[in-house]
Amino acid sequence: MTLVFALAGLLLAPQTRPSPAASPAAATEAVVETAQGRFVIRLLPEVAPRHVQHFAGTARAGGYDGTTFHRIIPHGIIQGGDPLSKDPAKAALYGTGGLGLLKAEFSDRPMTRGSVAAVLRPSSRDSAGNQFFICLSDQAALTGKFTIFGEVVDGMDVVDKIGETPVEGDRARARVEIQRISVK
């Protein structure tokens, strides 16, 4: 009989949960400010909760401030977020920093124009981290191979403008700096 009352007490006791506003995973939008303009990413915690939490936490800590979109494939993708890209003297290392922090959260969500996804080390599915890329066009061949954690919902013209930055190979010739990412 005591066990029944104990269980009833647990079921009737008010449940305390952290407020959604206090959790980085509760973030719904990220505003990315660059010298080229601003754009807005809708975060998708229902698709990739750990990636959204990591991205939001890094942004709130200022981890993206001063990084660059260092890799650009015209009409393909723009890639940024490498913490090494804050230092122009480390340009030869751009694309290697801030990885190996997260396990994959792959989905069947199509990799379409405006998709925001985690960068991986080559041949290493569980190697995501701070770096991300944004699709400038549909990239069907990438679907299910990278973790999509957001989508650009405003300012795609700014993303396109960044994608028009002159390149040498796939490296931006001029710094395209992320000034700040604020998360709401």
Image (spheres, rainbow, N blue to C red):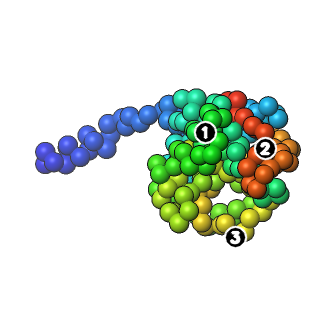
Amino acid carrying mark 2 in the image: Arg
Calculate the distance from the C-alpha at mark 2 to the C-alpha at mark 3.
Answer: 27 Å
Mark 1 or 2, nearer chain start: 1
Question: Does residue 36 appear in this view?
Answer: yes
Work out whether 130 lies above or below 114: above
Q: Marks 2 and 1: in contact by CB < 8 Å?
A: no
Q: Give the foreground label among 3 and 1.
A: 1
List the residue tagged with mark 2.
173
Mark 3 or 1, nearer chain start: 1
Question: Does residue 31 appear in this view?
Answer: no
Q: Given the current orientation, which residue lies at the most extreme left position?
A: 1
List the residue tagged with mark 1.
90
Q: Secondary structure at mark 2?
A: loop
The quarter of the picture where the C terminus appears is top right
Calculate the distance from the C-alpha at mark 3 to the C-alpha at mark 1.
Answer: 31 Å
List the residue tagged with mark 3.
141
Amino acid carrying mark 3 in the image: Ala
Q: Give the foreground label among 2 and 3.
A: 2
Camera-side residue of 154 and 158:
158
